[in-house]
Image (spheres, helix red, strand yellow):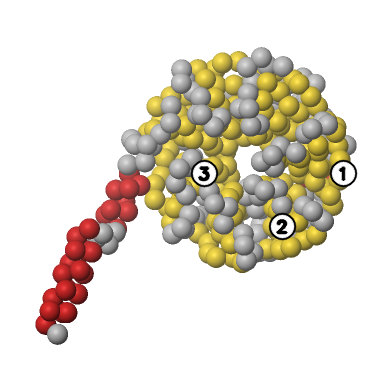
């Protein structure tokens, strides 16, 4: 009996030494050792800021066109593109390694660019033109507009694209619809009726579920893309600004711009799993995912900063300064 107790005690001691419990100080240290750089648009400054995670400081600022809103970073972290939405009518392409403006793509024919995504080749971007009612594809290196599809809807705004790049979907705020577009044929497939004032949108990697937010009634709705039936709907929002998935796509994260909070949903059970109340008057907007960890970087537009959120614990683990009125944000290791 004594031998058994000794064996149990020895195993427990070894387990503790090899796998000690994580303390609060260790958690904070993990957050403070995040490496890389955030790139964020500053709406009121017509600029982007480079923010070093290790020092939590702005290291550089570059100009955009007028009124930038969204920003994306290529998968290899070498390029970023801003949509110069309010009067800029352009895309600004940034060389992140050199930290310089590489070129400006004039969009006189397709003004008011907003939602934007890199396509799989990482050389082309797809974006919306709300003023001209188009879904557009351009090459960021040549600056050439390659194709444009008329959505025939008012205020075409944000977009989502399936991983196999078969279809793209755009929210059309004033038409209360989502346009389904064939990327293979560069053609409009159909319009999907939505709740009023749809804006935020995302699609599961397999293309099965389309999530969108509707601002009029504060709803987030999930649609089965095979039959366009509603499989889930969540209420109680005021302005569900964006929708982001965790790396395994088991969690959907939705910041609410007007209620200054973030809500989290299980994408398998379609149940809410928690929320994070932000500081008063935070105004959460742009959001992106760390390429390795389940950490979301969220712009607080009305506080001129970005917060890093641990998705599993739903806690803020770091804060970073920005310029005035940050929105679209991306991550690079450059």
Point out the tag, 3 or 1, that comes first from the N-terminus. Answer: 1
Circle 1/circle 2 CB separation < 8 Å = no
- Frontmost residue, 199 versus 203: 203
Residue 292 is left or right of residue 149, and the answer is left
- Frontmost residue, 147 versus 129: 147
Residue tagged 2: 222
Q: Where residue 280 sits: x, y (%)?
A: 50, 55
For image coordinates 50% across by 59% down, the residue present is 276
Q: CA distance from mark 1 to mark 2?
A: 18 Å
Q: Where residue 77 sits: x, y (%)?
A: 50, 29
Against 280, residue 322 (above or below) is above
Residue 193 is left or right of residue 304, and the answer is right
Point out the tag, 1 or 2, that comes first from the N-terminus. Answer: 1
User: Quarter holding the C terminus?
Assistant: top left
Residue 92 is left or right of residue 149, and the answer is left
User: Quarter holding the N terminus?
Assistant: bottom left
Against 214, residue 174 (above or below) is above
Q: Secondary structure at mark 2?
A: strand
The image's mark for residue 190 is: 1
- Frontmost residue, 218 versus 135: 135
Direction left: furthest residue: 2
For image coordinates 57% across by 38% down, the residue present is 327
Q: Residues within 10 Å of mark 2 (few under 14, many from 20)?
A: many
Q: Secondary structure at mark 1?
A: strand
Q: Secondary structure at mark 3?
A: strand
Point out the tag, 3 or 2, that comes first from the N-terminus. Answer: 2
**Quarter of the image holding residue 64?**
top right
For image coordinates 60% across by 15% down, the residue present is 103
Residue 278 is left or right of residue 258, and the answer is left
Residue tagged 3: 289
């Amino acid at each position: 009996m004594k031998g058994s107790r000794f064996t149990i005690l020895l195993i427990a001691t070894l387990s503790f030494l090899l796998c000690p419990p994580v303390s609060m100080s260790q958690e904070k240290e993990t957050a403070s050792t995040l490496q890389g750089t955030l790139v964020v648009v500053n709406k009121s400054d017509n600029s982007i800021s480079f923010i070093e995670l290790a020092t939590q400081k702005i290291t550089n600022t570059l100009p955009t066109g007028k009124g930038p809103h969204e920003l994306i970073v290529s998968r290899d972290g070498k390029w970023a593109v801003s949509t110069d939405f309010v009067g800029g009518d352009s895309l600004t392409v940034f060389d992140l390694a050199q930290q310089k403006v590489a070129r400006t793509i004039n969009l006189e024919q397709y003004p008011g660019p907003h939602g934007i995504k890199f396509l799989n080749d990482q050389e082309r971007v797809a974006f919306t033109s709300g003023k001209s009612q188009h879904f557009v594809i351009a090459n960021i290196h040549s600056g050439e507009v390659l194709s444009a599809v008329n959505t025939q809807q008012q205020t075409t705004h944000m977009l989502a694209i399936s991983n196999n790049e078969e279809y793209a979907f755009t929210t059309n705020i004033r038409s209360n619809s989502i346009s389904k577009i064939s990327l293979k044929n560069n053609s409009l497939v159909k319009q999907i009726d939505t709740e009023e004032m749809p804006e935020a949108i995302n699609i599961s990697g397999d293309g099965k579920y389309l999530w969108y937010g509707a601002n009029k009634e504060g709803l987030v709705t999930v649609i089965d893309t095979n039959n366009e039936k509603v499989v889930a709907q969540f209420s109680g929002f005021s302005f569900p600004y964006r929708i982001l998935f965790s790396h395994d796509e088991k969690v959907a994260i939705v910041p609410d711009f007007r209620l200054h909070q973030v809500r989290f949903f299980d994408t398998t059970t379609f149940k809410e799993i928690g929320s994070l109340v932000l500081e008063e008057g935070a105004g959460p907007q742009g959001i992106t995912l760390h390429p390795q960890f389940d950490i979301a970087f969220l712009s607080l537009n009305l506080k001129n900063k970005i917060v890093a959120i641990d998705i599993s614990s739903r806690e803020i683990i770091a804060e970073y300064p920005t310029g005035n009125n940050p929105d679209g944000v991306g991550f690079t290791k450059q």
